[in-house]
Image (cartoon, rainbow, N blue to C red):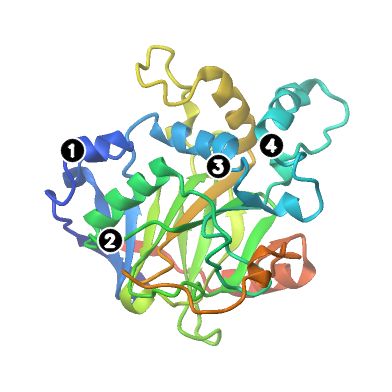
Amino acid sequence: MLSLRSVALSADAVSDQDAGRVGLQPLRQWSAYHVDGYPGFLFIVNPFMPGWQHHWVRQCLKLYPQKPNVCNLDLHMSPDSTRDLWSSSHAKLRNKLSQKRNEKTLLEKLRWVTLGFHYNWDTKKYYKEHQSPFPVDLAELSHCVSLACGFPGFKAEAGILNYYHMDSSLGIHVDESELDHSSPLLSFSFGQSSIFLLGGLSRDVSPTPMMMHSGDIMVMSGASRLLYHAVPRILRHPGGGILPPCLSAPPSTDDPNQLCSPSDWEVCELYMQFSRINMTVRQVLEAGGSFPEEGDKMGKRMTQGDSYHSVDIETQEAEEQGLTKRIRTVTQD
């Protein structure tokens, strides 16, 4: 039986003001847990203030996919076609309910976006010359979470955003491409729920399943930093509504911060009814470190695809059936 132990975070690690700037509640209100048997793994139950998940969903759909960031659609489309996926998709998404043929928009075809140092799916490496500016707001969010978890030196240098639909999955893998493994990997989830499988240092270790819901944060550090993990299935959030409660209410028109305009959220809401977005943030280089001396040809060459993301693949479904049989009830001590 999975056992969770409550963790008391240092309430003064991040000021209430700094936390509030990125939409996080004061640290004393967070619910954080260690998982027995997985030292260095931290599970934080939705610490976001009301309305702020709308903002981060909007960033992932409207801003972060824009160039010069890289996405899976760049593999077979021209740069002009993928420059602004939001502009090419939002009108079609709004009108989908009235259309007889529901052809997928470019946003709905999005599987991943890379930020900062761009991960090369072919070589499974990062390259010095293959990078774009890391989003300032996401770096600030990551800084606050890393401080709260006891990692004051963490620097957000690379991000991989995964876009899941109800038939999507993420195969078993380990995040070892970063040159710095002493810093944590931060993972943020929004939208529909998912089964998350946390394994061991090899594929042979039977994984432990747990549920991830909208707003939840995972931190993989220390002995858990290089563990195999996977997302075999996306599930409707518990409760029966189309969207989880934290995303059900539209943004207020009286919000002075205007985190997400009602018109933008109309598009985001249509997308999130059948989707989950996950943001992972990593530090690539050790403090003061640099990339090894090697040519950057592979870094600049566009990848041909990746072996982690799967949709409607028989072997993946068979793997899911075997894995989900081992799902255990989550209890909190």
Residue at mark 4 to residue at mark 3: CA–CA distance: 10 Å
Q: Residue at x 63, y 43 (%)?
A: 67
Q: Nearer the viewer, mark 4 or mark 1?
A: 4
Q: Name which residue type carries label 1.
A: Asp
- Give the class, few, some or many, for how many residues have Cα within 10 Å of label 2's Cα (few <14, many ≥20): many
First along the sequence among labels 2 and 3: 2
Please state the horizontal and vertical placement of residue 323, each as a whole percent of the image. 59, 73
Q: Nearer the viewer, mark 2 or mark 3?
A: 3
Residue at mark 4 to residue at mark 1: CA–CA distance: 35 Å
Q: Nearer the viewer, residue 47 or 319?
A: 47
Q: Which residue is mark 1?
A: 16
First along the sequence among labels 2 and 1: 1
Residue at mark 2 to residue at mark 1: CA–CA distance: 21 Å
Residue at mark 1 to residue at mark 3: CA–CA distance: 26 Å
**Residue 85 bears which disc, if any?**
4
Q: Nearer the viewer, residue 303 or 57?
A: 303
Q: Is residue 52 above or below residue 5?
A: above
Q: Which residue is mark 3?
A: 64
Query: Which quadrant, please, contains the C terminus?
Result: bottom left
